[in-house]
Image: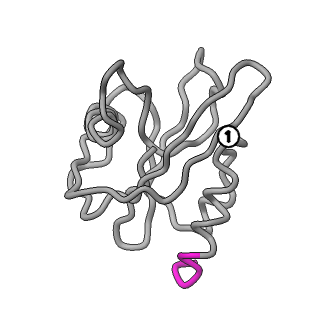
Amino acid sequence: MGILLREGRILVARRPRGTHLAGMWELPGGKRRPGEELQDTLRREIEEETGVRFRDAVLLHREEHAYPERAVELHFFLCRDPEGPGEGREGQEVRWVTLSELDTLEMPAGNQRLLEILGEQLADER
């Protein structure tokens, strides 16, 4: 999952109907293909979903979370110098939100610890 931070705002996308956790907001990113490196997955998924490219990325947090339906392993990267439109290229709603706005969105439970970390690290952005 990519944390795309631009001018004090973070890009989020709403999960589409018919998907796991439909209607919730999440950071862009997605499923890793067999044999694919994490950062390659991150670049591919973010560009496919939002049209955003970035210089490089740093792993901020790794989380394993068990939902009733499935278990997931999440890797959260801070993507540096994002460029591009930040639009929903797969029909999903996207928004650039402040950290305060992020706190008001319904997000998956597996993202909770990352949200706490962002709150601690970006407290001045609120």
Which residue is painted at 55% across and 40% down in the image?
74
Image vertical order of residue 93 relative to residue 98, above or below? above
Which residue is painted at 23% across and 54% down in the image?
54
Left or right, residue 106 beside residue 56: right
Main SS of residues in magenta: helix
Instruction: Name the kind of residue labelled 1 in the image.
Output: Pro
Over which residues does the magenta segment extend? 121-126
Label 1 crowd bin: few (<14), some (14–19), many (20+), radius 10 Å: some
Does the segment drawn in magenta span residue 76? no
On the image, numbered disc 1 is attached to which residue?
A: 108
Left or right, residue 70 beside residue 55: right
Point out residue 38 in the picture as x, y percentages from the top left corner: 36, 38
Query: Which quarter of the image is occupied by the C terminus?
Result: bottom right
Which residue is painted at 62% across and 75% down in the image?
120
Left or right, residue 32 beside residue 101: left
Quadrant of the image occupied by residue 4: bottom left
